[in-house]
Amino acid sequence: MRASFRTSLPLVSLSLGYFLVMLDVTVVTVAVPDIGASLHAGPAALQWCVDGYSTVFAGLLLLGGGLGDRFGHRRVFLWGLGVFTAASVACGLATTAGALVAGRLAQGAGAAFLVPASLALLRAAHPDRAARARAVTVWGAVASIAFGAGPVVGGLLVAGLDWRAVFWLNLPVGGPTILLTMRHIPAYRGLQSPEVGRMDPLGQVLGVVGLVALAGALNEAGTAGWTAPPVLAAAVTGVVALAAFAVVEHRLENGKTTSARRPLLPPSLFRRKAFSATAAIGFLISFGYYGMLFLSTLYFRQERGYDALETGLALLPSVCMGLIAAPLLGRVTARTGPYVPMAAGLFLGAAGFLGWLVVSPGVPYPALLFALAATGLGQTTTALAATAAVIDAAPADGTGVASAVFNVARQVGSAAGVALFGTVATAAGGFTAGLRLSAVLAAAAFLTGGVLAAALLLGVRRRRDAAATGLVPRVG
């Protein structure tokens, strides 16, 4: 029993780190009115208090993954935890809106270092594919619980204490997680790239500028409008920077420069069909699910008149599906691989989004339970299975960058879904009509992902059948 407990401590540490990242996505949202009143913050500052975290998180993910691949994932994981915890202290002590926004941006930077390193360490700690699948489901389920519990926990803390408590909460989790990591997670030198010193500074700058600008444009578009000059300027900057980033990475990988540096993101990674398709699925599920979660939150607050705590409780059947998905998925994925549950989750989620077509301001809450539960279970199942698939598809010394790409796809998908569905809700001749149209778009996104997952599954089975008949060597 003691040995089993000791071997589980690395998973506990990595899961707690991701728990902090996902909790802070949602726990702050319910505290925004109190923050505004306490710090005399305007709408722009409050928006950046919420969106700045996810913008920096998305923008620095590639850099965080690349640093982990080059300097060691344990070291970068500890950097991320330290920055995140220190930034939480800064947020809790903030006396001005500017100081709070700066703290939130620093939290996003810590999260960007932490998450890719966490997945790479998870792969190293569980080299067996079946054991790794079970570990990934636990890791992802803990994060799903944190995300779902955020509004409820935030509501309770704000009601019982004050808004600063949502940041102080990170200290009793972050501190012990750092100690657990230092004591129970080794460095796993085999994951580190042999070319540690040969960084790609131009690629890093272009990648950060491009992703931050693109994520910022998507976050601002939901409120300022798609044609607002700051949104257009940020979008153009992001597209140009990412296009230049792609050119630089291609030239570095193909030896078209005199530099001996390695690309931050090798373009050849996208020639792995399993990786590129799974990254696309990550975008699609976040686009559909988080776009609809944004609108459903507005629906309960504005159309039904729920307060913050009531809204959090109403959304629990959707956002806490990790409690159900994790125990089932760990066993299924270990036996079938990730693509069976991935496809099943996507088709279930698509059906759940269509369940929102019954919505109206006065529809009984039980009539929405299928839509809430099916979309939550479908999204969680798909996300956990896709995470396992990305780890399997990544090269051993590129797990950090591969997981960063997957998380970038999810972050950009989430921002795009919130921005687009928010626009649809205001331009469709009424909020309810916009909610229904957005549900159809979300269902289409999940159906598209389901087709991709089914194609991956068929490809795996064809290769296995061919290997069994001796026509080709067995793969994986």
Image (spheres, rainbow, N blue to C red):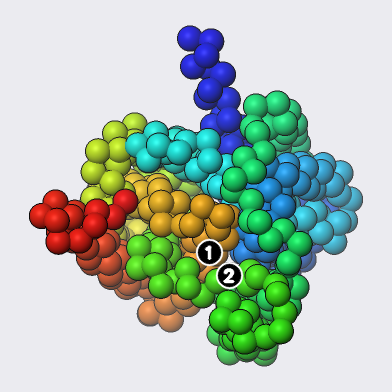
Indicate the position of residue 383 as horizontal and vertical percent values. 40, 52
Indicate the position of residue 155 as horizontal and vertical percent values. 60, 40
Instruction: Tell me, yes or no, whether the two marked residues, 1 and 2, touch with CB atoms within 8 Å.
Output: yes
Q: Tell me the number on the disc at residue 89.
A: none
Mark 2: secondary structure:
loop
Residue at (72, 79) in percent of width and height:
259
Q: Amino acid at mark 2?
A: Leu
On screen, residue 67 versus residue 305, left or right, reads: right
Relative vertical location of residue 400 with respect to residue 42 in this rendering, above or below: above
Label located before the other in sequence (1 or 2): 2
User: Does any portion of residue 173 appear in the rendered image?
Assistant: no
Residue at (52, 60) in percent of width and height:
402
Q: Tell me the number on the disc at residue 405.
A: 1
Q: Amino acid at mark 1?
A: Val
Q: Residue furthest left?
A: 469
User: Does any portion of residue 395 appear in the rendered image?
Assistant: yes
Give the camera-side residue of 337 and 329: 337
Residue at (58, 89) in percent of width and height:
227
Q: Report how far apart the C-alphas of labels 1 and 2 lie in the structure.
A: 9 Å
Indicate the position of residue 107 as horizontal and vertical percent values. 73, 52
Name the residue carrying label 2: 265
| Label 1: few (<14), some (14–19) or many (≥20) C-alpha neighbours in 10 Å | many
